[in-house]
Amino acid sequence: DGGITQSPKYLFRKEGQNVTLSCEQNLNHDAMYWYRQDPGQGLRLIYYSQIVNDFQKGDIAEGYSVSREKKESFPLTVTSAQKNPTAFYLCASSIGTGHTQYFGPGTRLTVL
Amino acid sequence: AQKVTQAQTEISVVEKEDVTLDCVYETRDTTYYLFWYKQPPSGELVFLIRRNSFDEQNEISGRYSWNFQKSTSSFNFTITASQVVDSAVYFCALSEGLRSGNTPLVFGKGTRLSVIA
């Protein structure tokens, strides 16, 4: 089945640790995105990538890093520089920016 | 700059009532795309509809309908004869077109709909 997978579903991190969230798609989409959602809030864009080996910062990139070495994969690293990382993280992909984005099931990150 | 406003934070209706979710957008581009997504309690966003700025035809899909009006910069979503399974958070989103670099989606803050049996 074609789709987007995110892992893990739940992630717990101690303060000061870096953690990496996985996002994989088999839809042959060029563009991929990471969003953060806080309780009762909308989605805020962290990073996006329109093509392999290229990515752009979104509205809240500080404390996060990404890589896009393969078309199918767009991992997000939450670094210790991110002061308030507890949130729900959603990954999405689309044929290109401006086109319909399809979302993965999300990863819920909690800092202990 | 692009912006999406969903003024209704939460709405509660009784099952079988009709309900309209409002969405107002701002953009300086003449080519843009509007979207609605549904987020059920599981958390995953489900795509509902995409419209481009040149197509103002209203659309109906089963119990769902969308009213796009450029004159008022609105793209409202109506659920007819609501059901408990419609309970979710609904997001409206906007993407600007080629002249603006095909921007990623900008989302409104969402409207939480509760349908009570």
Image (cartoon, coloured by chain):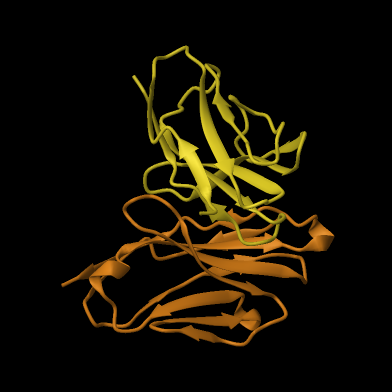
Chain colours: A yellow, B orange
Q: Quadrant of the C terminus of chain B?
A: bottom left
Query: From what the image shows, is residue B103 above or below residue B13?
Result: above
**Extreme residue toward the front, this view:** A1
Measured as percent of width and height from the top left, residue B80 is found at 34, 84
Measured as percent of width and height from the top left, residue B81 is found at 29, 83
Q: How many marks?
A: 0
Query: From what the image shows, is residue A9 above or below residue B69?
Result: above
Residue shown at 70% from the left, 35% from the top: A70
Residue shown at 37% from the left, 43% from the top: A39
**Extreme residue toward the left, this view:** B117
Residue shown at 63% from the left, 40% from the top: A59
From the viewer's side, name the closer residue of A10 and A78. Answer: A10
Residue shown at 44% from the left, 59% from the top: B110
Left or right side of B56 for B24: left
Query: Residue B64's quadrant in the figure?
Result: bottom left
Left or right side of A4 for A74: right
Measured as percent of width and height from the top left, residue B78 is found at 42, 79
From the viewer's side, name the closer residue of B34 and A71. Answer: A71
**Extreme residue toward the top, this view:** A16
Measured as percent of width and height from the top left, residue B83 is found at 26, 75
Left or right side of B96 for B86: left
Q: Quadrant of the N terminus of chain B?
A: bottom right
Query: From what the image shows, is residue A36 above or below residue B106?
Result: above
